[in-house]
Image (cartoon, rainbow, N blue to C red):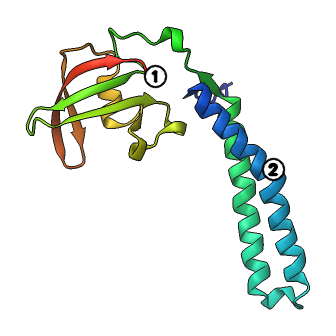
Amino acid sequence: MAENKEKEIFLTEDGLRKLEEKLEYYKTIHRKEVAERIRQSKEFGDISENAEYEDAKMEQALVEAEIVNLERVVRNAKLIDEKEIHTDVVSVGSTVKLKELDSNETEVYTIVGSAESDPTDHKISNESPVGSSVLGKHKGDKVDVKTPGGTVKYKILEISKK
């Protein structure tokens, strides 16, 4: 019999708090707003030809799906212990300074779990091409990262805690 084991989702304390707040918002406020939209749209008459009703029902399905997803993420969260983040090796929670060897440009990323990933805030997933390539590596190591645009070579200049 196969065991239904969901994968752990790495989160910082801040990331978990934000997801819990979002879940609470969806369950309390957003769910009620959508229910109210459905109630109001029923007042427009025949629901079989009521675009507002159909739109509200679609939004309700999306809200419920997001609630289920957020509950799964929170349930499977594995907190990143700040004390377990070391500066000698890249791990989830590490902040790394990388130098792209072809262009000599430097980039700084914090390696986070996929649920917390936000490239615009320099937080990249441990499952992303760059994130997975640098995990377990040390300062001074060179890594080849396979990207859709080809292979990019980086050198790890620095590993730090946030």
Which disc is residue 84 wearing?
none
The number of discs equals: 2
Circle 1 crowding by C-alpha within 10 Å: few under 14, some 14–19, many from 20: many
Q: Position of residue 36 (x, y in %)?
A: 87, 70
Task: Give the quarter of the figure containing the C terminus.
Answer: top left
Mark 2 and mark 1: span between their CA atoms? 29 Å
Q: Which element type, helix, strand or loop, lies under badge 2?
A: helix
> Which quadrant of the structure image shows residue 60?
bottom right
Under mark 2, the amino acid is Lys
Q: Position of residue 2 (x, y in %)?
A: 65, 26
Quick check: 41 left or right of 87? right
Which residue is farthest front? 162
Quick check: 36 left or right of 75? right
Which residue is farthest left? 102
Quick check: 87 left or right of 33? left
Q: Which residue is mark 1?
A: 93
Task: Give the quarter of the figure containing the N terminus.
Answer: top right
Residue pictured at 76% horizontal, 73% vertical: 56
Sequence-wise first label, 2 or 1: 2
Q: Which element type, helix, strand or loop, lies under badge 1?
A: loop
Up-down relation of residue 155 to residue 137 (above or below): below
Q: Position of residue 11 (x, y in %)?
A: 57, 28
Q: Which residue is mark 2?
A: 27
Q: Position of residue 76 (x, y in %)?
A: 66, 28
Circle 2 crowding by C-alpha within 10 Å: few under 14, some 14–19, many from 20: some
> Which quadrant of the structure image shows residue 118?
top left
Residue pictured at 31% horizontal, 36% vertical: 129
Residue pictured at 64% horizontal, 38% vertical: 18
Contact, CB < 8 Å: mark 2 with mark 1? no
Residue pictured at 77% horizontal, 71% vertical: 57
Under mark 1, the amino acid is Gly
